[in-house]
Image (tube, rainbow, N blue to C red):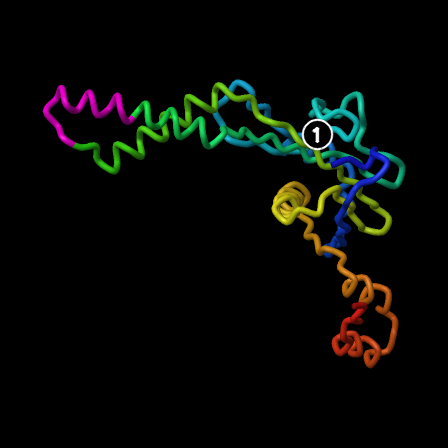
C-alpha cells in the first residue's frame, strides 16, 4: 500500500528504544544490508526487504535518498509466488501416475510416504519456476523527531513481518499506537490516579 495514493490504510508505531546518535549516519548502509532480493530467476516462494520510497526497483538509494528533512521514507517490498491449487493437484497426479508406472516395471506395488513427499517437493520446485512472483510494496515514513513510524498496512501478517525486519535492521523496538497507547503517551505528565482511570474505562455502546 502507498502513501502516495489519495487514500490508504496505515498503522502508527512508537519506537520504545532511544536511538543512538551514531544510528542516523548508518541508516543507508543498514537499509542496503536488508534490502530486497529479486527472485524472478529463483524457485523461492517469497522474498522481502527494503527498497526506495519512490521506486521499488531501487535498492541502492543513490538516486532517491531516504532522508526527507526530519523524516525517513522507504518501502517494504514483498514478492510472493503463488501457484494455483488446481495446477498443483494436476501436476502432482501426473507425477504419481508416472511413479506408479515406474514401480510396476520394477515389481513394486506402492509408493512410500517419503517418496510422495519428495515428488510433491519436486513438482512444487518445477511449478514455481514457471510462475512469476507477484510484487507488493508497503510504504514506511519515520518521524525521527517524535520517534513515530507510519506503516502503510493494517494486515497483521504484514505488521509482524514489518516489526521483525525493522528490529533486525535498526535494533529498535516498536509498539503499535492503539487508542490506549495514545492516551497513555499524552498523559505522561498527569497524576497517577488519572492514568489508573484508563484501566477502568468501559467501551461506549453505540448500537
| Residue found 26% across the figure and 21% down from its top | 98
Locate the N terminus by quadrant. Answer: top right
Numbered circles on residues, count:
1
Look at the image and say whether residue 40 sits in the magenta stretch.
no
Q: Secondary structure at mark 1?
A: strand
Q: Residues within 10 Å of mark 1 (few under 14, many from 20)?
A: many
- Left or right, 20 with respect to 145, comes to left
Magenta range: 96-109
- Left or right, 200 with respect to 126, comes to right
| Residue found 78% across the figure and 45% down from its top | 150
Residue farthest to the front, as pictured: 207
| Residue found 87% across the figure and 74% down from its top | 190
Q: Residue 187 appears at what percent x and percent y?
A: 86, 69
Q: Residue 176 appears at what percent x and percent y?
A: 72, 55
Locate the C terminus by quadrant. Answer: bottom right
Question: For this rendering, which residue is in front, 188 or 7?
Answer: 7
Q: Residue 143 appears at what percent x and percent y?
A: 83, 45
Question: For this rendering, which residue is in front, 7 or 69?
Answer: 7
Q: Main secondary structure of the magenta part?
A: helix
| Residue found 86% across the figure and 78% down from its top | 191
- Left or right, 125 with respect to 66, comes to left
Residue farthest to the bottom, as pictured: 193
Residue farthest to the right, as pictured: 69
Q: Residue 84 appears at what percent x and percent y?
A: 49, 29
On the image, numbered disc 1 is attached to which residue?
A: 51
Question: For this rendering, which residue is in front, 97 or 129?
Answer: 97
Considering only vertical position in the picture, is 30 above or below 173? above
Amino acid at each position: 500500500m502507498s502513501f502516495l495514493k489519495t487514500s490508504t490504510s496505515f498503522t502508527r508505531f512508537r519506537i520504545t528504544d532511544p536511538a543512538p546518535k551514531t544510528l542516523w549516519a548508518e541508516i543507508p548502509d543498514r537499509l542496503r544490508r536488508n534490502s530486497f532480493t529479486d527472485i524472478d530467476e529463483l524457485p523461492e516462494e517469497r522474498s522481502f526487504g527494503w527498497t526506495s520510497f519512490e521506486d521499488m526497483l531501487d535498492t541502492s538509494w543513490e538516486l532517491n535518498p531516504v532522508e526527507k528533512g526530519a523524516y525517513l521514507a522507504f518501502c517494504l517490498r514483498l514478492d510472493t509466488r503463488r501457484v494455483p491449487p488446481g495446477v498443483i493437484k494436476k501436476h502432482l497426479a501426473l507425477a504419481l501416475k508416472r511413479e506408479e508406472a515406474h514401480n510396476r516395471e520394477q515389481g513394486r506395488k506402492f509408493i512410500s510416504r517419503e517418496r510422495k513427499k519428495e515428488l510433491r517437493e519436486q513438482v512444487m520446485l518445477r511449478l514455481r519456476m514457471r510462475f512469476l512472483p507477484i510484487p507488493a510494496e508497503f510504504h514506511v515514513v519515520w518521524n525521527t523527531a517524535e520517534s513515530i513510524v507510519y506503516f502503510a498496512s493494517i494486515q497483521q501478517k504484514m505488521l509482524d513481518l514489518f516489526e521483525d525486519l525493522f528490529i533486525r535492521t535498526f535494533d529498535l523496538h516498536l509498539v503499535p499506537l492503539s487508542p490506549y497507547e495514545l492516551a497513555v503517551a499524552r498523559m505522561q505528565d498527569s497524576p497517577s490516579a488519572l492514568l489508573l482511570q484508563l484501566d477502568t474505562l468501559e467501551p461506549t455502546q453505540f448500537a
